[in-house]
Amino acid sequence: MASSTAKKIVSEIPTWIRVYDDGTVERPRSFPLVPPSLDDPVTGVSSKDIIISQNSKLSARLYLPKLDNDKVKLPIYIYFHGGGFFFESAFSKLYNDHLNKLLSVADFIAVSVQYRLAPEHPLPACYHDCWDALQWVASHASKSTTNTEPWLTDHGDFDKVFIGGDSAGGNIAHNIAMRAGLESLLCAVTISGAILSHPYFWGSQPVGSESVTNLEQNMNRLIWKLVYPCAPGGIDNPMINPMGPGAPSLAGLGCSKVLVLVAGKDDLRDRGLCYYEAVNKSGWQGKIQLFEDKDENHVFYLFNSESDTATQLIKRMASFLLN
């Protein structure tokens, strides 16, 4: 006879996440966590974990390439991982491997943000965390900062600060860039550019080749309902649908350039294309680039990083950060 006290599932996205009535959450498809490494044996990249805020338990993994010159100043790339806002980690093998590879191609500092996940911390919590992480990085442009990270103060070029991410992380990068268009960063730091890789945008009205049936059961709608159940406007909230009715003008993007990456077999492809076109038509004064890998799936380069296509895409990202 089954126990009457057995846990019951109160919400789930099958194979991805289960939420129980006692508040516990299972994320079956998350990659294993791995420790940082000083002088990675494959890439030579060093990494370490730091606490940004004791109060909010906000943390990050920092990456530094192997340097021949201790005086060199490097661009800074603040990275927001993907995972639908509800799974994955800055400390997972998936993202640790990705950033090690990216830094092995080009010399810059990476700050991979460990933001709070939904549903334990519903949106907009992660947006606040990522903004706070950006402000923490910016604070190091001043020698008077009390929270000093030597990799940033010794090697960071605060005239070249970039943000970016994949999937949900690409969504976060967009929203952080929009906020930076309204609010100043510490020490007068500005965002040089943003990489939106296969960004997670959606809306109530299908675009392009998106299905026009079973709209309420679409995976992207289910995710948004899980992670931001009280979102004003629901799936047309500007944070998920920056081209929707009532969304602020994309001319307000607070960075100088944007790289939008899409994949031909990704169901988010058409949203990425619409975003690129909308920014182009908005009157924004920056420069936006679009690149499509026509025969690839969503964030393919994370799962098949040694393929020729992934290698070329990594080089494209690196070039954007260095030029």
Image: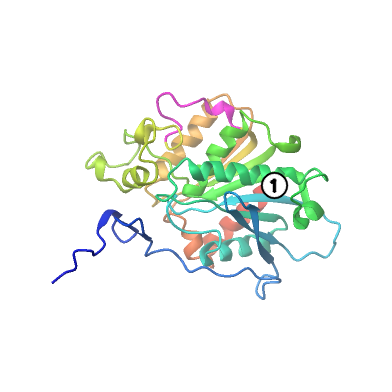
Q: Amino acid at mark 1?
A: Val
Magenta span of residues: 241-253
Magenta-drawn stretch contains 245: yes
Q: Is residue 73 visible?
A: no
Residue of label 1? 137
**Residue at the spot x=53%, y=25% of the render?**
282
* Magenta region, main secondary structure: loop
The correct choice, above or below, for 37 with respect to 221 in the image is below
**Quadrant containing the N terminus in the rendered view:** bottom left
Q: Quadrant location of residue 270?
A: top left
Q: Indicate yes or no whether the magenta region holds residue 19.
A: no
Front residue (pair 267, 296): 267
Q: Locate residue 180: give its quadrant.
A: top right
Q: Name the residue at the bottom extreme.
A: 41
Return the x and y of residue 183 as percentages of the image width and height: 63, 30
Towards the viewer: 303 or 216: 216
Q: Position of residue 138 (x, y in %)?
A: 71, 43
Query: Is 97 positioned to the left or the right of 103 in the image?
Result: left
Mark 1: which secondary structure? helix
Residue 64 appears in the picture as rendered? yes
Residue 257 in percent (x, y) is at 63, 38
Compared to 169, does 253 lie above or below? above
Q: Residue at x 63, y 64 (%)?
A: 100
Compared with residue 311, is residue 197 higher up or lower down, i.e. above or below? above
